[in-house]
Amino acid sequence: MSTLVPLYVILPLATAFLIPIFGRLIKGFEKALLSLVLLFLTLLSVYILFNGIQEPIVYAVGGWEPVNDVPIGIHLVLDGLSVFILLITSLIGFLATFYAISYIKKYTAENNFYALLSLMIAGMNGVILTGDMFNLYVFLEIAVIASYALVAFGTEKQELEASFKYQILGGVASLFILFSIGMLYWKTQTLNMADISNILSGKDQDFFLLFTQVLLIAGFGLKAAMIPFHAWLPDAHSSAPSPISAMLSGVLIKAVGIYAILRLFFNLFMISYEISIVITVIGALSMVIGVFLAIGQWDLKRLLAYHSISQMGYVVIGVGMGMIIMVKGGNLSIASLAIAGGLFHLINHAVFKGLLFLNAGAIEYVTGTRNLKMLGGIAKDLPVTTSTSLGASLSISGIPPFNGFFSKLIIIIAAIKGQFYLLAILAVLVSIITLASFMKFQRYAFFNKKTFTRKVKEVPFTMCFSMIVLVILCLALSLLAIPGVREVVLTPAVDVIMRTTEYSSSIIGM
């Protein structure tokens, strides 16, 4: 099984290398190859997930085995948490790629688009799998540099400005992360994450470690676009081609932001009360401020971008509540419930927000505008886009029986059980305002009086296919609320987070 682990990085990297060569010689090569690679990785993730991972699967890159129980090489580590995030990355990546087959024809240099997308996915998969701090930084840079280029892919003034802003703030985030890695190496004389965890487990939390953790929160908070580190996200997500907007919002901010925070603050450092409070407050601020920034927007993709900030706030407060309960020695079943709710909402957000960005792309594809004030009356002309966007809108607003309702409900129940009453109230209020925001979207985009005269028709098959699959998933993922299904998909990831010391012992003791 360990030999399958590097395929998540090797296949997208090889695809990014082959597309510029053979894409010029064979028509459609780039579309077919990347779609097949991502479909294979999605099926592989499903296979591994449903077969279960009892112990982390470790692949020693280059065959470098530990010397005197000290890991001297680079390791790729596949466990319940990483395969869960890899499934999200591969699935949304496949559907975005399939959608782009028709959508991207309006751009030139299709080969470059698919090569960059493949490179971004390789970087994200590397971040998810790596067991080495410096290689986490290297893979992170591969992913974000490709995303800078993809945001600017249209080469118009707006796209270039958004990409420049994204690069500047992304560079600041990378500087924070690299400086933190240097400080950890100075403290521990190792870059292996399991080895660092093993060394730090015998040390008290001092100012040095707290300062390092604050820098990491700032760095990965910028990558995840949490409040107050969110300035780049609305421009970047609204300017990028819609398949890339779906990838940025549905996958990238999770893989290089939220996932990294989960892995480092549960499996690398000892959980501290101060850091737990900081993370929870950032999540609450993102949830509340993001939705208020969204509701006043008339540019559809900017509206969706601000909702990404708000919805990721739900994920962060779920994780933050779990951290606080654990560090205070509270009821671990409540902590587990809070973290499970956060992870449940993580995959739900990838699906419904990815779908909403694809809906926005379909609307812009046929009408030429994203301005809600200039839309309306297209529901009959775009039945697939209308029905799928309605499903996604109900899901993000937390309306049953869609998946968003169940993940939000779990987070709210955990907040009440853990006596985080203010967070529970805020979560309910934000969900109500989210519903109001998406009622506005539905009304102005589809059901208002038509404000333009050009005849429109439904988007091509590949775009419809991706939207239909995602809206089906918006319903199907509700099954994760059922105990038997949850134990297969969510519980292994929650266990990795809850068992904070086992990540280290399973690798050091291999």
Image: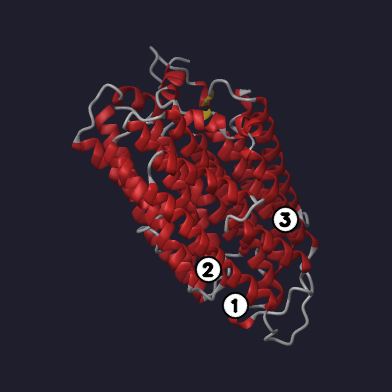
Report helix, strand or loop for mark 2: helix
Q: Is residue 360 left or right of residue 462?
A: left
Please name the amino acid that badge 1 sits on: Leu
Residue at the limit of the structure toward the top, as seen here: 68
Of tags 3 and 1, the one toward the viewer is 1
Residue at the disc numbered 3: 466
| CB under 8 Å between discs 2 and 1 | yes
Residue shown at the point (43%, 43%) measured from the top left: 416
Residue 472, image x, y percentages: 73, 51
Please name the amino acid that badge 2 sits on: Leu
Within 10 Å of disc 3 (Cα), the crowding (few <14, some 14-19, many 20+) is: many
Instruction: Give the mark, 3 or 2, whose residue is nearer the N terminus.
Output: 2
Q: Is residue 174 visible?
A: no
| Disc on res. 372 | 1
Residue shown at the point (30%, 41%) measured from the top left: 275
- The answer to whether 208 is drawn above or below residue 161 in the figure is above
Quarter of the image with the N terminus in it? top right
Q: In which quarter of the view is residue 211 placed?
A: top left
Q: How is the image coloured?
A: secondary structure
The residue closer to the viewer here, 339 or 431, is: 431
Within 10 Å of disc 1 (Cα), the crowding (few <14, some 14-19, many 20+) is: some
- The answer to whether 379 is drawn above or below residue 176 in the figure is below
Q: Is residue 126 visible?
A: yes
Instruction: Give the mark, 3 or 1, whose residue is nearer the N terminus.
Output: 1
